[in-house]
Image (cartoon, rainbow, N blue to C red):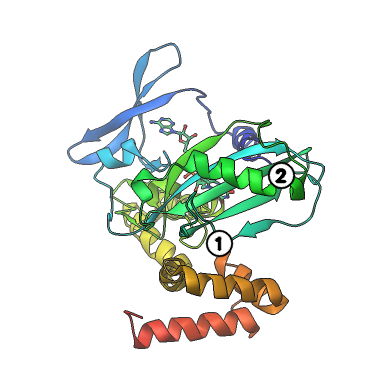
Amino acid sequence: MRRRDLDRAVLDLASRCGAEVLAGHEAIEPVVERGFVRGAHVRSPDGVTRSIDADHVVVADGANSPFGRALGTFRTRRWPYAAAIRSYWTSPRSDDDRLEIVLDLADRSGQALPGYGWVAPVGDGTVNIGVGLLSTARDFKTTNVAHLLEAFAVDLADRWGIDPSAKAGVTRVGRVPMGGSVQPTAGPTFLVVGDAAGVASPFTGAGIDAAYETGRMAADVLHEALSGAGPTALQRYPRLVAETYAEQYKLARLWGRLLGRPAAMRRVSGAAVRSRTVGDTMLRIMSGALRHDEFGAPETVARLATRVLQVAPEA
Ligand SMILES: Cc1cc2nc3c(=O)[nH]c(=O)nc-3n(C[C@H](O)[C@H](O)[C@H](O)COP(=O)(O)OP(=O)(O)OC[C@H]3O[C@@H](n4cnc5c(N)ncnc54)[C@H](O)[C@@H]3O)c2cc1C
């Protein structure tokens, strides 16, 4: 399913449940009264500005989050973020039931890059092809991700039956803050969710699930606040977020270091390709799909790695 269809379905559901949807409106800045956020100044598509009062505000304005910044959120600059680009191509393999992930990305000169490429069959005659690059890449600022995607599509063309010069959808490019790198995520009357809170997976840069998950956590604590617990309920939200993602973020620190060492990365990805157990283990850890009631290979590796980090935090 494409993201726009998922969002449309969720929006329709919210609307059917009684939410008033103001399509095309822009939240320009917070309404602040005596230091508390009390709503938003909003501009309609025809340019009319008005203010909307609210007891609580959920900030969900994505990676750049100007609304969040106006409330004092900031990204810890020394933590890596990802730059990603993706587009769609028509492919006879659109109904495949497998993803292709390429871990040994390289630039035009053959220099290994910390990042990965993917091909995801969409099931509507197209495949989603993209690349993501970590900001720790040596020449990150001067690397053109559009060129990387072009070269990647050419490499894949035969395997996926695509014409690299004929895209079948809109190209999206952007950056993704990851690993809980944005703080604070709660104030007395506001909560911050999704990319605005920097909660995407530091393994993959994938943040759609975390955006929905943090949205649900925010809804839960707001429900508590409105059901009598009062504003203090909002302060439970940062703890909920930390508890949910702490283990994944810790493991990702090790992963980030691995990505920065192309030779080690090649050995790991080679092992993942040769051994189904190693491949499945990597995928389960990277996607955050560990099962805490199980003692399979992924859970064991994750526990060992977490233990290493406890004993040697700088490992
Ligand atoms: C090229 C690329 C590919 C990606 N691929 C994947 C993937 O395959 N899987 C995955 O899980 N993640 C992927 N990600 C990451 C994922 O897109 C984000 O983590 C996710 O979209 C975060 O959701 P969000 O709702 O927090 O923010 P967004 O999806 O950015 O949504 C924010 C919304 O707020 C709106 N908005 C912003 N400012 C205002 C304002 N002032 N007033 C009103 N509205 C406003 C924006 O228009 C936007 O609709 C990708 C990212 C990129 C850049």
Residue 5: which quarter of the image?
top right
Quick one: which residue is furthest to the bottom in this view? 311
Residue visible at 55% across and 61% down in the picture: 104
Task: Provide residue 307's location: percent of width, then percent of height.
Answer: 43, 86
Q: Which mark is residue 104?
A: 1
Task: Provide residue 235's location: percent of width, then percent of height.
Answer: 33, 58
Q: Dot 1: what SS? A: loop
Q: Quadrant of the C terminus?
A: bottom left
Residue 272: which quarter of the image?
bottom right
Residue 300, compared with residue 31, is above or below; it is: below
Task: Provide residue 174's location: percent of width, then percent of height.
Answer: 45, 40
Q: Is residue 300 left or right of residue 40?
A: right
Q: Quadrant of the N terminus?
A: top right
Q: Which residue is mark 2?
A: 157
Q: Dot 2: what SS? A: helix
Callout 1 touching callout 2 (CB < 8 Å): no
State whether residue 293 appears in this view: no
Which kind of residue does numbered mark 2 sit on?
Ala
Residue visible at 80% across and 46% down in the picture: 93
Task: Provide residue 249's location: percent of width, then percent of height.
Answer: 43, 67
Tell me if the residue at label 1 has its CB under 8 Å from ligand 1: no
First of labels 1, 2 by sequence position? 1
Residue 15, compared with residue 288, is above or below; it is: above
Tell me if the residue at label 2 has its CB under 8 Å from ligand 1: no
7, 85: nearer the viewer: 85
Total number of numbered labels? 2
State whether residue 165 appears in this view: yes
